[in-house]
Amino acid sequence: MTEIFPTSRCVREFYSHFLDRDAIVPKALGIAEFESKVLLVPDMSLADEDSRVLIMQEASEFKNFSELKIQREFLSFIKNSAYLFRFFEELALEDVLIEELELADTYAQFEEHLSILKELLQNYKTLLMQKKLYDKITLPEVYKLNEEFLKSNDSFLLHLEGFLNKFELNLFIEVAKITEFKISLHVTKYNRKNIELFEELGFSLSVGNSYILNLTTKEIQSIYEIKTKKVDCDVRNFTTRTLQASFVYEKIEEFIQSGIEAENIAVIVPDESFATTLKAYDSFKNLNFAMGESYRHSELFKKLDAVDKLIRVREVEHKYRVNRLRIEQSTIDEFQKSWRKKLQADEIISFLRVFCDESKRDEIYEEELFKFKSLLKSLGKTELQIAIKLFLNRLMSRSKDDVMGGKVTVMGALESRGMSYEGVIIVDFSDEFVPKRSQKDMFLSSTIRTHAKLPNRSDRENLQRYFYYSLINGAKKVAISYTKNDQSMGSRFLDELGLLSKASCDETSYFKPLFTSSVIPPRYNPEKLEGSYDIKAGTLSASKLKTILTCKRQFYYKYILKSKEAKIPNAQISEADIGNLLHEALHYVLQNMKVVDENLLMIELRRYLQSEDRGLIWHYHLDIWLEYLKDFASLEAKRYNEGYRVYGLEKSLHVEYKGFKLEGKIDRIDIRDNRLSVIDYKSGKIPKSTLKTLENETNFQLEFYYLLANTQKEVESLSYYDLKKAELVEESLFSEKMEKLDEVLKELETPLTEFEKCEKTTPCQYCAFVKLCGRKL
């Protein structure tokens, strides 16, 4: 019998149990290897990713394609085409025709969009056939079974983890007609969808049992109850994401001291980028990284990528990067001269070899160069900038094996399928990363998915629950951590899995293993600052007033000395950056939208946020925010149908009030029945006022906006727009806050003469001038 496992790691684990046995070792294959052996496509070759993009772009050369709002400019098309491939691949693997989607009751342009997608798909399939190529989209239509391979095996046993798509199920049914084929699976409340799937084949399954199903005889060969046990689980939260690394090393030591072997401990990273943080603090090489080390970290990739970013996006951080990598200006000039020129394959390869060191042969780079040269020859002359982008895309998908790693394995949640460990540590178990958001819903809403019997959001989330449940239930000891602060909170999966977080721990002890610090005496720390500043002489904004009321010393540095915050150029994105990017996207899309339609609004927002200039710093957070914006788009369509229209966006206004010159730029003003609704977008925490906090209130933003907008027309409402929850939160205590504002302005009629430090240190946490004050946080 040949056993089939979900991953190659499971295969290696299976074989490891026979190392000390003097016996014939059973055959074992990963599911991908099994499919590669059993599926034959005569006279055709598998299309590589670059070829697929080029063919899809060629297939899009028809008039109505522009209605999808996907740019055909090559570099933009590379990014947007990923959604097209996911859409077509899912339909193919789930055996759903586009015609079946047309029956769904949805938005007005949906049928037109499906018609365009249908034409695009047909063009793409035709081009693939002409070039004698196939891919995941066309595989279900062109494959033949390798009967010789199947007959050479007495039977197969598939260890199923998760769900089967229609293509896989039909494939296994066909295989079962030729040779005995069995499926082993566990049925829990998180993968109960399998009950319906196998019921159609005549199997009656129930939650809480494990089965071996014989597809050939259509019989349940064995059944036994899944035993659940109380797991020793420690759940902690930290205000800083990096501190989780210290928690990981603490738990590894604790698990080993309890008797668990290092080889039997796994660290699960829902967001694999956190592996970089773990690696940075792995001083004793205790960890091995299943995902390897991304080729992005190689010197050759960094240099080529730095030149690409410098020429494509002229930002100061990219200038610093090329200097840091010691790239000669003459080299950059050579790239610049030929950047938009169409070059032959050999000329392009010469540019790609500029940073190669013959004495240090890089096998991955050389391998990709060899394959890329063949692609370039088939393309003919190609612009250098396009060729470099294509080549970087190829390199990004590669990784180097972690040959120097230790015994504790670090892996992604998907890679953990089918594996069992005595000690399990899961980091980043926050709402931001768990559940992982899908990128498959650009064209299909949940309603359409349900109608077409395609996997929906609930199905995908249940699959992730199943993976985590299996890991936790199979372990002796479990440790889970997540970030809890103003921007992050624990995943709802914690409650659903019955896991409770312990009370907040002393984070100081977790800082010590990661960081060492020494006290540096302040170079500038005057206890008193005196002068004179007449607020009525200039303009007053809500943010300037907030600074005055929060800390007069900060106001002195920021508005009187006009000191600027010193920022080190980098490609990281802060919460403020996120807010600014969302503001820009909403402003751009809404100002050009005559009729607000939920699906069209979503497509336009997705298109804008994926634009080249944004992608370099924004892609990390993109999937999360696109999920939030779906509810936003739905609310916008509802408001439009209720009669609301956009009156102004980013509208700058001025007004004289109580002797002060007030100014402000309002994110958005809507109008209905000649009355205004003032809106301020919030991507983070919504400010809330209470009678208890009113005495020390510093935020009068909506009150300023009321006074400013009232110069235009009557103001009906003042609201914060919570973009995460897609709801309008009206200003609380408006009348009381207006009275308080009047009191504050009365006190500020006298010029400021002293600029003392704030009494509490809470505002100092995010103050750019805290070092000047010598405050210890």
Image (cartoon, helix red, strand yellow):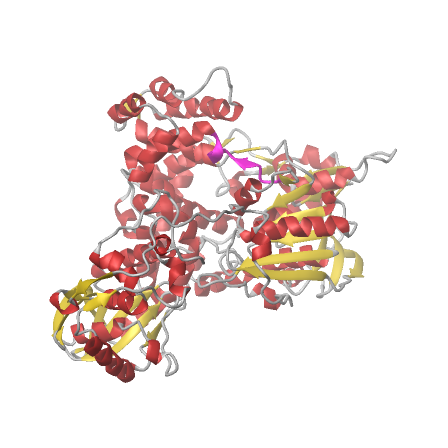
Query: Is 6 above or below relative to 448?
Result: above
Q: Residue at x 55, y 36 (%)?
A: 293
Q: Nearer the viewer, residue 720 or 145?
A: 720
Q: Is residue 323 left or right of residue 294?
A: left
Q: Is residue 488 left or right of residue 774?
A: right
Query: Residue 393 location in percent, x, y?
Result: 42, 35
Name the quadrant of the N terminus: top right
Query: Residue 196 location in percent, x, y?
Result: 63, 63
Query: Residue 127 location in percent, x, y?
Result: 39, 35
For residue 421, say whether it is visible: no
Query: Is 69 above or below relative to 351?
Result: below
Name the quadrant of the C terminus: bottom left
For residue 694, say whether it is visible: yes
Q: Residue at x 44, y 50 (%)?
A: 87
Taking the magenta stretch, the answer to whether it contains residue 478 is no
Place residue 387 in its image quadrant. Answer: top left
Query: Is 2 above or below relative to 505?
Result: above
Query: Residue 255 location in percent, x, y?
Result: 73, 51
Q: Which residues are magenta?
A: 289-298
Q: Nearer the viewer, residue 292 or 13?
A: 292
